[in-house]
Image (cartoon, coloured by chain):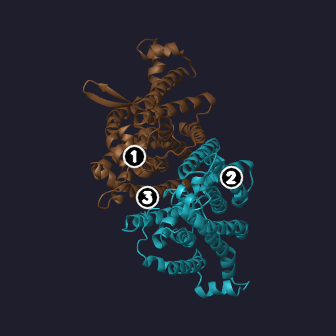
Amino acid sequence: MTATARPVLTDRRPLILLGLAAAVVVAVALSLAIGAQWLRPAEVWQAVTDPDPAAPATAIVRELRLPRTVLGVLVGSALGAAGALMQGHTRNPLADPGLLGIAAGASFAVVLGIQLGTGGLTGYIWFAFAGALLASVAVFGIASGRRGGPTPVTLALAGMAISALLASFTQSILLADDASLNVFRFWVVGSLSGRDATVAAQVAPFIAAGLLLAMVNAPALNALGLGEEVARALGQRVLPARAVGVAAIVLLAGAATAACGPIGFLGLIVPHVARYLVGPDHRWLIPASALAGAVVLLLADVLGRVVVSPGELQTGIVLAAVGAPFFVALVRSRRGAVKL
Amino acid sequence: MNPTGPSALVQPPGRRVLHIGPMTGTLAVRSVAVGVAGLALTAAIVVHSIGHGSFTIAPGDVVSTLLGGGTAAQKLIVLDLRLPRILTALLVGAALAVSGALTQTFARNPLASPDVLGVTHGASLGAVAVIVLGGGAAIGAVPLAALAGGLITATLVYLLAWRQGVDGFRLVLVGIGIGEVVTAGVSWFLVRAEIVDAARATIWLNGSVAGADWSQVRPLSLGLAVLLPLAVATSFTLQALQFDDDVSKSLGVRLQAARLAVVLTAVALAAGAVAAAGPIEFVAFVVPQIALRLCGGSRPPLIVSAILGALLVSAADLAARLVLPDRELPVGLVTAMVGAPYLLWLLIRTNRRVSA
């Protein structure tokens, strides 16, 4: 089952985490420096450290690129960690945070918000968050039976069913209303653009709490990975562990989806990359997934700004177009398909 | 995944042993009961569905017209206008359900559906590209574009997953990766399209059997007549494939040949269905799971899945026309609205561990 037969790998894991953290710093620097308006590195550095209100570089870096970069770090790490939790709890490599009904619930609530006419992309944040929360509570409630909490299979099946149900409601509203479709099709692609600093500030507490819960959940998740009977025999209480995990996933993925729209693919591929790097132990896998998620999302966003400059390509589209071939190459590589 | 052990082969649970002359076989009593009940319900829905419309026809007249009687007007309405639509619904439902059952068994994953083989997404890209680039004039080319897109993408997934043979786990992951690229292409087309084309593409993406005629039914029924027996023929192999690779090999299965046969059958079934009616995705995922829970056993049953798939899509089509008569709701939306609550109810009611 596990691919960490080589003890050498264990010793390298702190170094790998450090390397990932360094990669985040590089990605942040790139995200601040690169954009439609070319700025010299010195100008960028000055705008960050010693802002001169008169210089145009200050406005570009501090008003436009900094909030976007901060949001990218937050959302990327949230989706990466949520993906690792989701795949661990369902013991299914195909699971992503959307499987808990989060993307479908957020989408449905956003379409309702568009119908009610709450203006602007940022106006939909609380709608999306509430939708994600309600949908995932419904999934968890239905999947948990009379005793012992949900099994991986029922959790995944209930999530798929609720998602499909909500998506069909969303689609039937959109089919009747072209004006809503016109707003929704831009939200559903997933993008970091057009979100100001207040968005990052609004979702940051939820993501911080979610990351904390995720780390608390990691040892229990390792035990649950052995199967529920074994976990119980080891003294692990299954239902509380599942509840903490689901709460973390909802906080992380709900906040990320509310801020940027559904970028589900990130939560699906990043844990596979992280598992390739640090192995299946969740105490290492979750932080590695969070860091890798931030790197991947920032790089995809930067690339989206460069390829069709001066316009830009939505982050979700770039992520799929560039991330997926990379993912396929990883899966094909010798050690790539590390099973759960 | 807890496949039933060897002891179950000696004394199959829920099966009755039959002796006919020198032959001995087993009969799954519960599956037969579910299948017969499904067929009866489907027949009732077909008769009701053909009778329902702007010009109502009594059930008795529907049956007599189908059997060759009826007036000229009834023949026109029943045979030329309404029969192709209901037949498309039945065939598409059966094809998708069997495709889903095959995929879920060989991938050993209840979340797998023909989507992970790249068929549905590829077909969507082909169709949406034609709708957006060609405008209204190219609407006739949509089924062909969907068929081509689905088959090309599935081939690409299979080739990319090949590495000294294809492994179910790797095939599924590669399929998800490629599916994501293709879906991004669909989103890209939708974002840059005129809103008229985006709306038309959205209708196709939801799946619909409205406006189906005999030119769609004939190739679809021909395809199913070949592919369904093929699918059933693979079921002995499937029985072994649900164990892990080493066990399958020791049971005498030639893994690569068996996988290729199963994948080809599943892809062809799904591609045909999507070309005819658009991606009615939920059917392929939910019907095998419902069939498994109704029949018991260790993997989704093929024939019962086909019957229940036909039942679900035809019932959803009828429900769409009964509930919202003035607005054509795409059948793909109704299958989710009908199928999802039913699966949820089954999950709550049984609430015991069933692995697929």
Residue B97's x, y, as percent?
45, 39
Q: Amino acid at mark 3?
A: Leu
User: Of all residues shown, which one is farthest toward the left?
Assistant: B22
Q: Could you say which quadrant of the image residue B216 lies in?
A: top left
Residue B350 shown left or right of residue B149 in the figure: right
**SS label for mark 1:** loop
* Residue at the image point whose x is 65% and y is 73% from the top: A70
Q: CA distance from mark 2 to mark 3?
A: 29 Å
Chain B painted colour: brown
**SS label for mark 2:** helix
Q: Please tell me whether residue A250 is drawn above or below residue A310 in the rendered image.
A: above
Pinpoint the chain carrying mark 2: A
Residue A38's x, y, as percent?
58, 79
* Residue at the image point whose x is 41% and y is 51% from the top: B107
**Residue carrying label 2:** A131
For the residue pair B316 and B38, the one nearer the viewer reads as B38
Within 10 angstroms of label 1, few (less than 14), some, or many (20 or more) residues? few
For the residue pair A305 and B103, the one nearer the viewer reads as B103
Q: CA distance from mark 1 to mark 2?
A: 43 Å
The answer to whether residue A290 is seen in the rendering is yes
Pinpoint the chain carrying mark 3: B
Q: Amino acid at mark 2?
A: Gly
Q: How many marks?
A: 3
| Marks 2 & 3, CB-CB < 8 Å contact | no
Q: CA distance from mark 1 to mark 3?
A: 28 Å
Q: Amino acid at mark 1?
A: Gly
Q: Which quadrant of the figure contains the N terminus of chain A?
A: bottom left
Q: Please tell me whether residue B143 is drawn above or below residue B307 in the rendered image.
A: below
**Residue carrying label 1:** B5
Chain A painted colour: cyan
**Residue carrying label 3:** B173
